[in-house]
Image (spheres, rainbow, N blue to C red):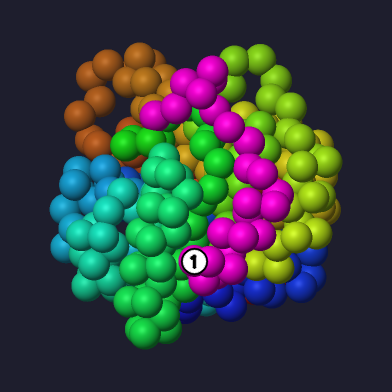
Amino acid sequence: MLVTSKELLLDAQKNGYAVGAFNTNNLEITHAIIRAAEAKRAPVLVQISAGALKYAGPEFLPMIVAKAAQQASVPVAIHLDHGPDFKTVLLALRTGFTSIMRDASKLPYEQNVAEVRKVVEVCHALGIPVEAEIGKIGGAEEHVVVSEREALMTDPDEAARFVEDAGFDFLAVAIGNAHGFYKGEPKLDFDRLDAIRRRVSVPLVLHGASGIPDYQITEAVKRGICKINIDTEIRYAFITTMKKIMDEKPGEIDPRKILGPAIDAMQAVVESKIEIFQSAGRA
């Protein structure tokens, strides 16, 4: 069933688990996410970035995800991931998204607030919740590129002021997480997370969770993370499975025999994450 993300994350916050937010770029990844959610009886967010919209077509990919969500027996929200500007937000709203992130975290504080407030006014008028971000996250996420040297952790006091000033529904925080695969084992700053949680009442979001050890994810959920983004590990399962089949069967020309096992591999990744996030059986 198609829902907004607000009801999902508020329930996660109340009951001590995290909802998985999984990025899609095409039909195959969407199938994997929805099948995993059904198998685990878990609520999910299917995330679409500006780059994915450009790649698959703004009319086509949201339509595919919306149809899958409507037919699913578990709650599914369609989320704009790292919305880079107001124009993309409006496009997402026009094409049926039920959750929006406006990422203005690279801007100075007052500009971040102004950009997010503008989106909040439009989205809340339509009953659509908004995610915002403060503090820079290392690595790269399409238009968001921050070097390790420049990466900044979220300041707890500034986070509390940001929620008050901008009026959004969920907050993405930087506590040592990064986009893409990590170089070495990441170390999440749980003391910082605790401090943010004490000062901020809205659900908290962890980006760049691909590659973070399971025990750290479990601890982050325990300490108040309610939404966790996964993209890179799904892509890795997709590509490596396809490569393996094509290497083993170089004469294979039926895409279904290549893409079918890749969907299964991605589904396994999503199911594993759902278990770690403790959202299995919450639908």
Which quadrant of the view contains residue 101?
Answer: bottom left
Q: Is 247 above or below relative to 207?
A: above
Residue at point 66% right, 32% down? 176
Position of residue 154 measured from the top left corner of the image (x, y, whole percent): 63, 42
Q: Nearer the viewer, residue 148 or 280?
A: 148
Q: Can residue 183 be seen in the rendering of this structure?
A: yes
Name of the residue lying farthest toward the front? 110
Q: Nearer the viewer, residue 92 or 20?
A: 92
Residue flagged by tag 1: what amino acid is it?
Ala
Residue at point 76% right, 73% down? 14
Q: Nearer the viewer, residue 97 or 25?
A: 97
User: Which region shows up in magenta?
Assistant: 145-169
Let me know if residue 236 is in the magenta part: no
Q: Is 252 above or below relative to 229?
A: above
Q: Give the side of residue 201 with respect to residue 16, left or right.
A: left
Q: Which residue is mark 1?
A: 166
